[in-house]
Image (tube, rainbow, N blue to C red):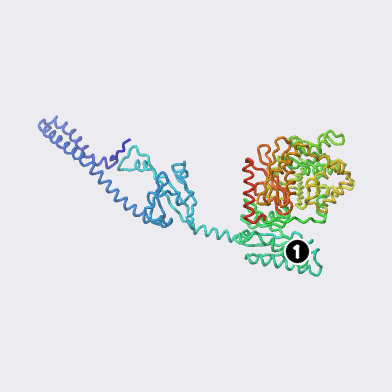
């Protein structure tokens, strides 16, 4: 459509007023004809002459007048343009595609460009792309946080419709034009952000430092030198915190309270909490190195909330085995350290206290429900059987919640199904448990502390009283508001923990041989036939089970592989790739195996027998997901590797699930290992 410019409004009426007067003269002339014809003829001649002059002037002068108006508007626009050009606020005009068509002096100074810069705005601010400009989205005005060199700006972009400008004009009219420009303004936020960052850096952070093995370390040194060891540790901790401009005060013999600036915490992060390693250097003849756990809370709304964050963080650090630092903030939890093996505590005081607490809880409840993790294994089922026996000894109704029975567990489960010594309701599904559970019931969760991977997560919502027994290190996702929580990372298995609790629950408690077999099997599998994490208390628990009828031969028969599973495991081991000369990665092809994830875990254990392998990773495709089994002996912490990929577990035994295909899964593992090696998390 051809564009045309016409006068309108008051200017149009003013220029046409002479023509309107001519029409008035015609009306007067008609009246004069009724009075005097000669006078009317004379006036008619005058009117014809007048109209001819007026029409010719209008036709001739209209372009001149429009040009004069445009010239005036241009001169006026030049004044406005000069004002915009000298405006201290950085300002630019962009076309529909984001190309710069005009800039003022302040904008040129802000982006360090000369007058006449006509490239796309994306070349200056990569985050402002064409598809995010006003006109390409519904919003007429948008804002972006942008950086240029060392300056921080808020970029505000507003769509300016030229059609609307023409329609709102009182002088000219434009038809068939639908273009627009984009006005860009930059608001310098550098000083404000520096001020806010400074305020944030000066905000309070609370830290708690606990000595993990205080009593054990003192016992390993001569009595006359114990005070010197304590003094050296105090000096090491206080000097380190003082160097960060913080305050450290001893609350108890093995606990410190730390107050520091948030900026100081950043220094700790950069140094990867090297205080963890510095304390270990304190040695005055003590056979056992002192290790510490650090919990830091910050970014809370109040000082009290930061302290609560610090308490949660130190609980996480201790629950994960100690010798590490945990930082807790409102939206995230960060972990540092945790590379050393947790030292087994020789005392069973804690187990006795937990056993008595469990007895009191069960005694006042009507029913007990026990469940482990999804796709249960020998350890979770064996521990469930142990809790079941405690409940029955105390005269309570008990149920084990189990949805899917894997091939490795089937021989054990079959022992109790159709057994006249056990009720039919001993083993139930999650759906049945949800229908049966009452208001006065207790739920005991074993071998898992993450609510999302329990056998039936909905049961956690329907039960007010929850007890947790687990030997895996805690992560950021935990079962909250547990009435009783017993999580020991140094324990070889949950079956070991439950076996200890069984000894303190009741003097009249007697477990049956088949129950002892299940507990023994759980310990045997999780320790890889007593070759990993088997301590003094592990063998004491096994001795207790042997005294109660556990039979090694019966247990061994329960776990013999079938030929297909054995060949699948052997094939996975034979196809293993040794990545970076230390990490074995392979794929378990379990198409013809009932439970390929278990075979994959067994293959991961087998790969550790290869000389030079620090850790093994076996990928198994099952139910549309990739299950990764990670194992190590002592040179690598596979839990932190699994956590990087969204999983978790134990220092030597961990896993995760990936939603991708096998090649991408292998790439993710290699990328994670590369990153952690570069960051110093893995040697």
Residue 449 to residue 211: above or below: above
Residue 29 image position (x, y, % from top left): 16, 33
Look at 26% across and 43% down and name the residue there: 66
Q: Nearer the viewer, residue 676 or 318?
A: 676
Q: Quadrant of residue 564?
A: top right
Residue 282 image position (x, y, % from top left): 73, 66
Residue 341 image position (x, y, % from top left): 74, 55
184 on left or right of 461: left
State the quadrant of the C terminus: bottom right
Would residue 480 be seen by someone viewing this image from the given angle? Answer: no
Look at 28% across and 46% down and name the residue there: 70
Q: Nearer the viewer, residue 417 or 47?
A: 417
Report the residue marked by disc 1.
253
141 on left or right of 16: right
Would residue 153 be seen by someone viewing this image from the given angle? Answer: yes
Look at 72% across and 48% down and name the residue there: 631
140 on left or right of 632: left
Residue 491 image position (x, y, % from top left): 78, 51
How many other residues sit within 10 Å of disc 1, few (<14), some (14-19) or many (≥20)? Answer: few
Residue 57 to residue 346: above or below: above
Q: Nearer the viewer, residue 587 or 334?
A: 587
Q: Quadrant of residue 312?
A: bottom right
Counting the numbered discs, the total is 1
Look at 63% across and 65% down and name the residue there: 244
State the quadrant of the N terminus: top left
């Amino acid at each position: 459509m051809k564009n045309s410019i016409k006068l309108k409004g008051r200017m149009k009426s003013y220029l046409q007023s002479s023509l309107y007067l001519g029409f008035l003269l015609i009306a007067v002339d008609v009246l004069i004809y009724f009075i005097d014809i000669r006078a009317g003829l004379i006036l008619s001649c005058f009117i014809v002459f007048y109209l001819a002059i007026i029409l010719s002037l209008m036709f001739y002068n209209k372009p001149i007048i429009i040009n004069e108006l445009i010239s005036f508007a241009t001169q006026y626009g030049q004044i406005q343009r000069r004002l915009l050009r000298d405006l201290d606020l950085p300002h630019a005009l962009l076309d529909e595609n984001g190309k710069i068509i005009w800039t003022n002096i302040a904008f040129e100074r802000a982006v360090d460009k000369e007058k006449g810069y006509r490239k796309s705005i994306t070349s200056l601010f990569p985050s402002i792309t064409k598809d995010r400009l006003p006109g390409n989205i519904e919003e007429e005005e948008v804002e972006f946080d942008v950086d240029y060199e060392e300056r921080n700006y808020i970029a505000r972009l507003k769509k300016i419709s030229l059609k609307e400008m023409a329609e709102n004009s009182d002088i000219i009219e434009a038809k068939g034009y639908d273009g627009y420009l984009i006005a860009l303004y930059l608001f310098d936020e550098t000083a404000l952000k520096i001020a806010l960052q400074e305020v944030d850096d000066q905000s309070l952070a609370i830290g708690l430092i606990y000595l993990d093995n205080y009593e054990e370390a003192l016992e390993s040194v001569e009595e006359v030198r114990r005070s010197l060891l304590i003094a050296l540790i105090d000096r090491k901790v206080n000097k380190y915190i003082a160097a960060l401009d913080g305050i450290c005060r001893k609350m108890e013999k093995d606990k410190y309270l730390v107050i520091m600036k948030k900026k100081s915490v950043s220094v700790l992060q950069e140094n990867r909490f090297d205080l963890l390693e510095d304390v270990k250097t304190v040695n005055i003849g003590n056979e056992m190195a002192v290790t510490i756990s650090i919990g830091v809370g910050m970014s809370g709304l109040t000082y009290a909330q930061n302290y609560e964050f610090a308490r949660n963080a130190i609980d996480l650090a201790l629950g994960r085995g100690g010798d590490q630092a945990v930082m807790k903030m409102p939206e995230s939890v960060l972990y540092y350290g945790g590379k050393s093996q947790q030292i087994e505590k020789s005392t069973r005081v804690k187990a006795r206290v937990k056993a008595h607490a469990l007895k009191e809880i069960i005694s006042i409840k009507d029913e007990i429900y026990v469940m482990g993790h999804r796709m249960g294994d020998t350890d979770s089922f064996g521990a469930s059987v142990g809790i079941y026996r405690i409940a029955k000894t105390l005269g309570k109704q008990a149920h084990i919640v189990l949805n899917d029975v894997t091939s490795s567990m089937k021989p054990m489960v079959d022992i109790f199904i159709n057994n006249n010594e056990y009720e039919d309701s001993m083993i139930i599904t999650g759906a049945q448990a949800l229908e049966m559970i009452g208001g006065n019931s207790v739920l005991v969760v074993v071998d898992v502390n993450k609510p999302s991977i329990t056998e039936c997560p909905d049961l956690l919502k329907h039960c007010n009283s929850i007890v947790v027994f687990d030997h895996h290190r805690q992560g950021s996702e935990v079962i909250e508001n547990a009435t009783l929580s017993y999580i020991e990372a140094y324990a070889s298995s949950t079956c070991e923990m439950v076996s200890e609790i069984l000894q303190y629950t009741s003097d009249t408690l007697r477990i049956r041989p088949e129950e002892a077999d299940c507990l023994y099997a759980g310990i045997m599998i999780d320790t890889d036939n007593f070759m990993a994490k088997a301590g003094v208390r592990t063998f004491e628990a096994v001795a207790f089970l042997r005294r109660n009828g556990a039979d090694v031969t019966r247990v061994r028969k329960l776990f013999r592989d079938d030929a297909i599973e054995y060949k699948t495991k052997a094939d996975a081991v034979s196809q293993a790739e040794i990545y970076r000369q230390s990490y074995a990665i392979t794929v378990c092809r379990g198409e013809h195996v009932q439970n390929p994830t278990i075979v994959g875990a067994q293959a991961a254990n087998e790969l550790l027998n290869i000389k030079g392998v620090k850790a093994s990773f076996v990928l198994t495709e099952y139910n549309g997901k990739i299950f990764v089994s990670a194992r190590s002996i002592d040179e690598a912490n596979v839990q932190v590797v699994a956590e990087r990929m969204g999983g978790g577990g134990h220092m030597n035994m961990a896993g995760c699930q990936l939603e991708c295909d096998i090649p991408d899964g292998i790439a993710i593992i290699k990328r994670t290992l590369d990153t952690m090696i570069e960051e110093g998390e893995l040697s």
